[in-house]
Image: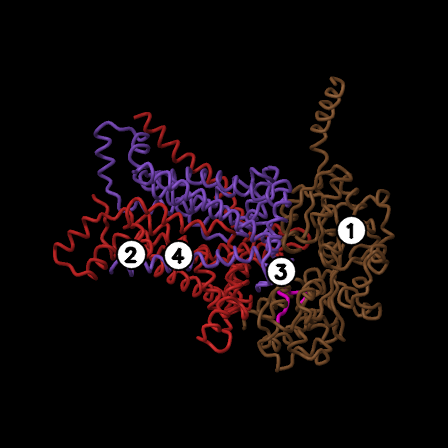
Amino acid sequence: MNRISKLSYLMAIYLFLYTPIFVLIAYSFNDSSYSLLWNGFTLHWYESLLQNIHLQVVALHSLIVGVLAATGATAIGTLAAVSLYRYKFFGKKLLHGLIFVLIISPDIVTGISLLILFSTLKIDLGFWTLLLSHITFCIPFVTVTIYSRLMGQDKNIFEAAKDLGATEGTIFVKILIPLLLPAILAGWLLSFTLSMDDVIISFFVTGPDFDVLPLKIFSMVRVGIKPEINALCSIMFGLTLAIVLTYQLLTWKKQR
Amino acid sequence: MIRDKIFRKFSIGTVWFWLALFALIPSFLLFITSLLVQGDTELVRLQLTLDNYLRLLNTHYLRVFLRSFMLASGCTLICLFLAYPFSYLVARSSNRHKGILLLFVIIPFWTSSLIRSYAIVAILKTHGLLNTLLLALGIIKQPLQLMYTHTATLIGLVYALLPLMILPLYTNIEKLDVRLIDAARDLGARKDQVFFKVILPLTLPGILAGCLLVFLPAMTIFYIPDLLGGAKTILIGNIIQNQFLAARDWPMGATISVALTLLIGILLFIYRQRIQYQEPSYESH
Amino acid sequence: MRKYLAWFICFLAVNSVLAEENVLNVYAWSGYLSENVIQQFEKETGIRINHSTYINNEILYAKLKANPYAGYDIAIPSTYFISRMIKQNLLQKIDKSKIKSLKNIDPNFLNKEYDVGNSYSVPYLWNATGIAINKKYHLIDSIKSWKDLWDSRYENQLLVLDDTRELFSVALMVLGFPVNDTNPDNIRKAFEKLKSLMSNIKLFNTDAQRSIYLDEDITLGMAWNGDIYLAQQENPNLHLIYPDEGFVISLDCLVIPKGALHVENAHRFINFILRPEIAKQVSLDSGFSTPNQAALKLLPESISTHPVLYPSARLMKKGKLQAEVGNTATVYEKYFEQLKLEN
């Protein structure tokens, strides 16, 4: 496998992943409200996006929930993966089962059952119910990712640490976290992605004063996705790219 | 020692508390609902019955399940074959590049999957980008009718679920000890032997995790088959959706969901037993 | 100067206290309530609107049923859902003494059996389902009735709405049965009729019909009149036919859910929407037809007499309003599932 074929394979996959994105960005300049065929260039949609405060607020809501939910889910998911791997405790198999149930449950089932839970506990729908729900459905993805990294891990390392006088807490912080860091980050990224994109669960558990972007997009399907949304997605994509590239440039500079 | 116990209790306790409240109780409610009957004015009538489960035992549901299973399996396998080489190459690249290569995989997925699906529609349409390109290059004479086919659905599914395969594979391959590969080569193993007897078994947990994270959502996703497949074939996700929304038969919806969970759970359990039987454990004793 | 500052601070304080109260939670189909109308309402009344959206009646119903106190003040369901929601105590009565201009609504849309006396609902927008046809590919005169769609030359060409009631209505109309039929035998016959249509159907879709017809992916099939009207603006080859057997009319109305938190504001909103110039704006922005006859007079003639949006009175007689079918809904759903399964 020489370098060229390796590089071409990577490029091919990236092309597959990015072509729809390029199409999406291109269509944000499309001079047509409802057609998916090219009709001419215009900046009109970016203008109307700048005036659409509601859409911007909604996008912000999604980002806030995404970051918080990803962080919460990663924290709990990591604890879960580690506990399941290292400790024996009552109900361990049940916990495994719950993680599994959470992944396989169709969104609509999770959404409605959480709604009923909140209704019974008389919790008002809104930001908090949304956040709690998002953390919940992201946890299993983090747990599975981290657990798979733990599997096959040499357990002697923990014995050795204990012999040297380390507490469980120290083992967690000084051994496990550095060991699992790629998986933890992967879990965070995964959770953020899932949260930013969730429609059905969000629909059921959010309240009237907290709308999120995927809901807005999903319901726009009914009357036609205006390229305004494409403009929003293009801007978000551009911003993310800018942040990532800046961060990378800074870390590369440091490594010099 | 006390500190240890506290840490342990805190760890397990937090996880248990959260999942008990937000996963166990709703699941329990769901299970109870599956034993109830559809009500006239209220959603359920408080009357226990196993009728719903008996209703499942007809070929109608079995066929839908099989169809969903085939689609999900196909999607999972394609994702696996595409993602494995990719994750391997990224994991083996220099530390400088690893992070950014991985981030670049994830970034597209922070745009709404629905919008990206519409972009795929724009590409595959009769007068869409792909056909325009192929016609202009003279590769085809008539536009390809790709929309509203199983192929389109598969493309859409693979596209939506690929990162769920890439990330677990990557985190698993990343910790592969290069020295094991070197050792195998030193012992005279050929390239394919190195792969099948060293690399593959060691990365199996990653493969399993990735397959799990792709297969399960693929079983219940509904909007991609609707959008790209033309909603002509009905899948488990659609059926459950219909039960809860259009038919307002929440007990039946709950039943199908519970049955699906149990069925997949059993399949996974059998699979894990066989894997553990065949593969020696790599955990040290 | 200090006096003004004091007044200003008082004003802010009072405003922030009242701010909680000066809100209206509106739950609507996207595209039904434009930014235009929202901003106008907010400017006039100082009430801030929280605009949330849902994708169809069924999902709205599921949410309100699971949690009637979800906090929405206004929702816009369709008629047959309204009658169900009334029966199941999910809505509260509209205080008629507060609603001044109900008379602006065309009497043909008032006082129907889904809500006799309009105690719970006020009509907002309506749409009709006809046959969309692209003149470039088909002769307009070749299609006159729903049953023409069964012709074998349309194999694998049609778009049908992915909605049980809409699709079954077509078969029911062809067989001469009422569209709100609750007779299981008739429904079964409709199912058999639809089975024979399956080979002509290329796809089921409700949401993206506008762009599908516009881009000519499909050149013949079911469609909502509002969607075709808007698509026509960009593709003049499109046309909508109101078939001989009749057509389904769905009427969407403003309702106040039981758990509404700002009932007073909800009434102000309803009054606002009933004003002719507002109803006209609502209709223009959404692209759908208004039941408000006072608004109709304000619309440009090219729109108010447009055959797609406002068919003649003679044609409207063939329109059939959707109504609730009670428990037979499950029967319809089972057949719909089976239709897709045996494909």
Alpha-carbon span between mark 2 and mark 4: 33 Å
Mark 3 or mark 2, whichever is nearer to me: 3
Residue beneath disc 4: A14
Say above or below: A191 vs B267: above
**Labels 1, 3: one chain:** no
Alpha-carbon span between mark 2 and mark 1: 61 Å
Q: Is residue B202 left or right of residue C153?
A: left
Q: Is residue B108 left or right of residue B210?
A: right
Crowding at mark 4 (Cα within 10 Å: few <14, some 14-19, many 20+): some
Q: Colour of chain B?
A: red
Disc 3, SS: loop
Residue beneath disc 2: B275
Residue beneath disc 3: A32
Identified by mark 4, the residue type is: Tyr
- The chain in purple: A
**Labels 3, 2: one chain:** no
Task: Indicate whether residue C162 is drawn in magenta.
Answer: yes
**Labels 1, 4: one chain:** no
Q: Give the residues drawn in magenta, as a range.
A: C159-166
Crowding at mark 1 (Cα within 10 Å: few <14, some 14-19, many 20+): many
Residue C334 in sight from this viewpoint? no
